[in-house]
Structures are given as C-alpha cells and as structure tokens.
Image: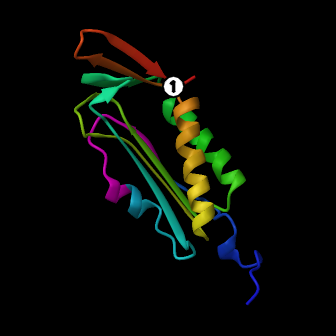
C-alpha cells in the first residue's frame, strides 16, 4: 500500500491546539496525554521536564519559576508555529510557575501526529522553542549560597 497524504487524518487537524496553560498548581502528565488523544494519530510524543537536584556541577536547594503576563500568549504563538510546520492532530503544553521542589514537574508538552517521526520532531521543536521564546524565568538557589536566574528571551 502506497503512503499518501490525501487522507484527512494525514493532515493537520482544524483546531489542533488543545491545551496551553501556565499554572501555579501541580502539573498532570495524564491531563496532557488525554488532551492530545486523536483517532488519526499514529504517534504521540510527550516530554516531561522535572526539577533536578543540580545544575552546572552545583547542588540545587531551591527553585522557583516566574513569568511575564504574556507567557500563555507566547506559548500559543510557539504552538501555532509547530502546527504550521508539522501535520499536528493535537498539541498541549503546560508550564508551572511558583516554588517547586526537586522532582516536581516543571513543564509537560505533547504532540500527536499521524506518524511517530513527525510526533517526535514536532514535540522536540515545541519544547525547544518554548524554552527559548516564552518569557518564563527560573530562579535557582544553590547549596554553596549562590543564586542564578535563567530564562527565555
């Protein structure tokens, strides 16, 4: 059977962006996974970013995220670019703000596409572009007493 892009299931869905949010409450992998369910998707790629206990060779004791009021709108712009580049059936992205503990979920993104390769590529672009373009900043406090702000833009 020859592979063709003529079937509607091979195309980007009419409204593929299902969930975009910045939250002060704990994130749910299940919520994001459910948001991207689509019968035409043969692949769902999901990325979960967690708070680790070190950065740059130094132990992290505390971490907090803050964002500009435009963060959700900027997340949507990034999502729209991904949808324009890949045959996305469904897409979701949520990012946490506030004080987080080691092991907490900081960001969860998922993309459903007709095929796994597209899903992997689209998910990678989504998380990479979110980290570079959305005004969300991370404030780390290290065990050696130093602090660092890391952020997008």
Instruction: Write down the quadrant of residue 87 in the picture.
Output: bottom right
Disc 1 crowd rating (10 Å Cα; few below 14, some 14-19, many 20+) is: some
> Residue 65 at what x, y percent from top left?
36, 26
**Position of 81 compared to 128: left or right?**
right
Residues rendered magenta in the picture? 20-31
Q: Residue at x 57, y 33 (%)?
A: 74
Front residue of 104/80: it is 104
> Is 117 on the left-hand or right-hand side of 70?
right
In x, y percent, where is residue 23? Answer: 35, 37
Residue at 50% over, 64% down: 44
> Residue 123, relative to residue 118: is it above or below?
above
**Residue annotated with mark 1:** 135
Locate residue 39, reporting x and y percent: 52, 76
State yes or no: residue 26 in magenta. yes
Comparing 15 with 92, the one in front is 92
Going 59% across and 38% down the picture, which residue do you hit? 129
Q: Quadrant of residue 78?
A: top right
């Amino acid at each position: 059977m020859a592979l063709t892009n003529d079937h509607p299931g091979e195309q980007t869905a009419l409204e593929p962006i299902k969930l975009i949010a910045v939250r002060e409450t704990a994130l749910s992998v299940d919520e994001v996974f459910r948001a991207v369910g689509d019968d035409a998707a043969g692949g769902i790629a999901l990325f979960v970013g967690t708070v680790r206990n070190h950065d740059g060779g130094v132990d992290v004791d505390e971490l907090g995220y803050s964002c500009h009021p435009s963060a959700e709108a900027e997340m949507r712009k990034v999502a729209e670019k991904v949808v324009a580049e890949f045959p996305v059936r469904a897409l979701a992205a949520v990012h946490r703000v506030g004080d987080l503990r080691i092991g907490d979920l900081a960001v969860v993104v998922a993309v459903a596409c007709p095929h796994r390769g597209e899903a992997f590529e689209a998910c990678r672009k989504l998380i990479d572009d979110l980290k570079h373009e959305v005004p969300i900043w991370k404030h780390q406090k290290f065990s050696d007493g130093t602090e660092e702000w890391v952020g997008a833009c």
